[in-house]
Amino acid sequence: SETAAYVIVYVVLAACSCVAVSAGYFVFQVLRKDASGNDDDKSGADFWYSARGTQGPVSLGLSFFSSAMGGWVLFSAPEVGALSGWWGTIGYALASSLPFVLFMWLGPIIRRRFTGGFCLTDWVRQRFGRPLQLYVSLVTVFYMWVYMVAELTSIGNLVRDMSGLSPLNALLPVSLITMLYTGLSGLPGSIWTDRLQGVIMVIFIIVTIIACFGGLHIAEGKWGEVATWSDKGFESLVTLILAVVGAELFNMGSWQRVYAAESVAALRKGCALGAVLIFLTMFLFGLSGMLAEAQDRSRPESTLVIKALAFFDLLMSQNSGIQGLVFALAVCMVASSMDSLQTGLISVLSKDILGTTLTQVQSLIAGQMFLVAVNVPAIIMAFESTKDPALGGNIINLFLVADSSP
């Protein structure tokens, strides 16, 4: 219902905001210490931008997991499973988790070679110069901004289809509230909320998957038609791994967390935890697409026309409690991705902003103004794409281009 949708959206966002405000208080204390002359490498504006050297393995693992698993998972993973069988399901799970395995090796190298950085573009400037840094920055900003639009579009479409509300009633509060608490507490706030969101997501995913996998009606032989190891599926595996791994390495939100790790050991353990959670999540949702396709083939007449809605085909047979849980999961997924993308976008400019003659407060305001500058057009574009299916399709196509552009 509309009332339930409002409650879910604002309860989830309120919980995240409370955690972020707590982080914001901690940031304020660090800033106050810095103002009194007790300066260190975790203080002031640098801490707001980087949370440098403060995060343990569990915090990092949950942060990698929740920031990587956006609302797109509910649509893309089941679609690949329905269309490409086992190879596609396993390929998408591998493609989404492998970047964090690579971070276990690449992260310590970049940290060692550029100790005072905020993200990958800083190392690129040191190693290859300003021109290539500008090119890499443009690619990453394009990728992350389109990612933001796609996330807002997905939550807008979801609230419209599940409750009948205008998409603006979901995408606007998600964007504005994540922008406000990210502007208040910076990267520390994003990571702190990731912990909460990560725990919620794990619990909700387990409950909804168990519910949706029960009571299926699959005719004899139909599962075998779907659960295949086809050449087309293998092509999907290779394509997904090349595209997604390459794109994720240009996600500056992930590189920020490399610098936020308290040690190399914490970074590697956090990457391992994040990779395992991501692989299992993607595999389970891919499997849900396979099951939905097999069930649809068992019906007298097919009703699953749009394969991206495969998971929701299973969900429609569930009670309102499970459906509400999935909606809360979607809000949580989008919020976690949005705040990570917002801080990731800021990180591209962090080194240059802090290298100016601006005071600490002015440096923070500059980062906050940049947040507003990227959010406003993202909201407008996402809202327009929910009204126009053709534009929405173009946004998804643009996202695919961004995925393969690196």
Image (tube, rainbow, N blue to C red):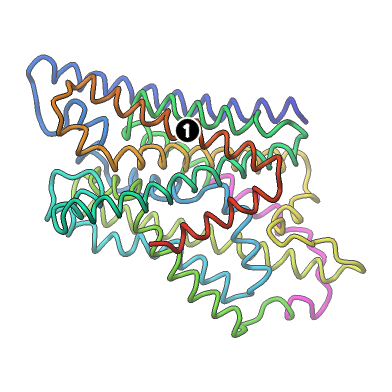
As helix, strand or loop, the secondary structure at mark 1 comes to helix
Above or below: residue 118 compared with residue 307: above
Q: Amino acid at mark 1?
A: Asn
Q: Position of residue 361 (x, y in %)?
A: 23, 19
**Residue bounds of the magenta highlight:** 202-224
Which sits in the foreground, 68 or 318? 68
Answer left or right for 55 relative to 140: left
Which sits in the foreground, 62 or 332? 332
Determine which quarter of the picture holds residue 191: top left
Above or below: residue 400 compared with residue 35: below
Residue, x 37% and y 55% (percent of image)?
A: 273
Q: Position of residue 365 (x, y in %)?
A: 30, 22
Determine which quarter of the picture holds residue 192: top left
Considering every residue shown, the one lying at the far right of the view is 300
Above or below: residue 86 compared with residue 186: below
Residue, x 76% and y 70% (percent of image)?
A: 294
Answer left or right for 131 relative to 304: left
Answer left or right for 187 relative to 4: left
Q: Position of residue 377 (x, y in %)?
A: 51, 34
User: For the C terminus, which image quadrant?
Assistant: bottom left
Residue, x 55% and y 31% (percent of image)?
A: 174
Residue at the disc numbered 1: 375
Above or below: residue 223 compared with residue 68: below
213 in magenta = yes
Which sits in the foreground, 347 or 40? 347
Answer left or right for 87 relative to 249: right
Considering every residue shown, the one lying at the far bottom of the view is 231
